[in-house]
Image (cartoon, grey):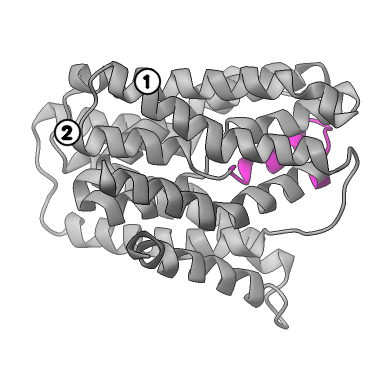
Amino acid sequence: MQSFLLLLPDFALIALGAALRHMPGLGDGFWTGVEKLVYFVLFPALLFNALARAPIDIGGMAPLFGVGLATMVAGLLLGLLGRPLMGLGAMAFASRLQCAYRFNTYIGIAVAGKLAGAAGVATMGALCGAMVPFANMAAVAMLARHGQGSLGRELARNPLILATLAGMAFSVSGLALPAPLQPFLQRLADAAVTLGLLAVGAALRVGRSEGGPFGALYLCVVKLLALPAVAWGLGRAVGLEGVAFQTAVAFAALPTASSAYILAMRMGGDGPGVARLISATTVAAAVTLTFWLTRLGAA
């Protein structure tokens, strides 16, 4: 119950976003603008602010990054094993496969802040930022035959990657943020979580899609139950403790990011099917994240 109450405000914001999308004047065009604001301005400010102000031991974070990457690879492989359940064409399957390993950074930052405060936000921010290139490369590789543009160029201009690298470099440099800049970045960071979660709710979609329910259920189980179990076992095996261990498990338990839908649409894939899977993992995560946070609290 305590873990559920911990997550309740965040999922209440997601539910509010879903309700607001149906209000006059707050349709898809409005939420597209909100998503761009969060993605290109607010969330990079949050990541930079959290990482720039936190002492970061890059060498010490290597085991955490290793667990995160191994967990994503496990999601990719488990997703590939489930293809016979889906009955989909190659492009539709490649589109939905993303939902087995991609992660929602907005929810991750919100959960990490509840778990471990500023240290949790910085650790989750560093982990998500480090994993974004791998998530994009895996997804684009599977969709490449229909893709347009350069993967390298997309990664080089990804605002989350740039903010993560800049924040970590600033932290390692030993410099301090100028006093007037700190409250400015903090206000942007505060807005990022709230608007990010509202945008997640506004993006929820329901309805049936091609391929039947068993394939979708399989991918949801992989993402929300199997991957956190993998991260738990790997984290214990490499000796992760405290905030690092909590972050690894919480990261693995996150629902799928809306960027999976954007990439599928951009590369000619099954956007509607991906959107429904993202919605399913987000709604189910209200239960599964509560379960994993309860386990973490008892560990």
Q: How crowded is mark 1: few (under 14 residues within 10 Å), some or many (20 or more)?
A: many
User: Residue 97: in sight, yes or no?
Assistant: yes
Q: Which mark is residue 234?
A: 1
Residue at x 75%, y 34% (from the top left corner): 96
**Residue 267 is a magenta residue:** yes
The amino acid marked with disc number 2 is Ser
User: Residue 41: in sight, yes or no?
Assistant: no
Residue at x 84%, y 30% (from the top left corner): 86
Q: Residue furthest bottom?
A: 24
Secondary element under disc 2, as helix, strand or loop, is: helix
Q: In this view, does 32 lie above or below 281?
A: below
The magenta segment is 256-272
Q: Residue 171 carries which label?
A: 2
Question: Image check: 153 left or right of 250?
Answer: right
Inter-mark Cα distance, 2 to 1: 28 Å
Q: Horizontal and vertical percent for residue 38?
A: 49, 55
Q: Which mark is residue 136?
A: none
Question: Image check: 212 left or right of 222?
Answer: right
The amino acid marked with disc number 1 is Leu
Q: In which quarter of the image is residue 247?
A: top left
Residue at x 63%, y 76% (from the top left corner): 20
Q: In this view, does 114 lie above or below 77?
A: below
Q: Residues within 10 Å of mark 2 (few under 14, many from 20)?
A: many
Q: Horizontal and vertical percent for residue 108?
A: 42, 47
Secondary element under disc 1, as helix, strand or loop, is: helix
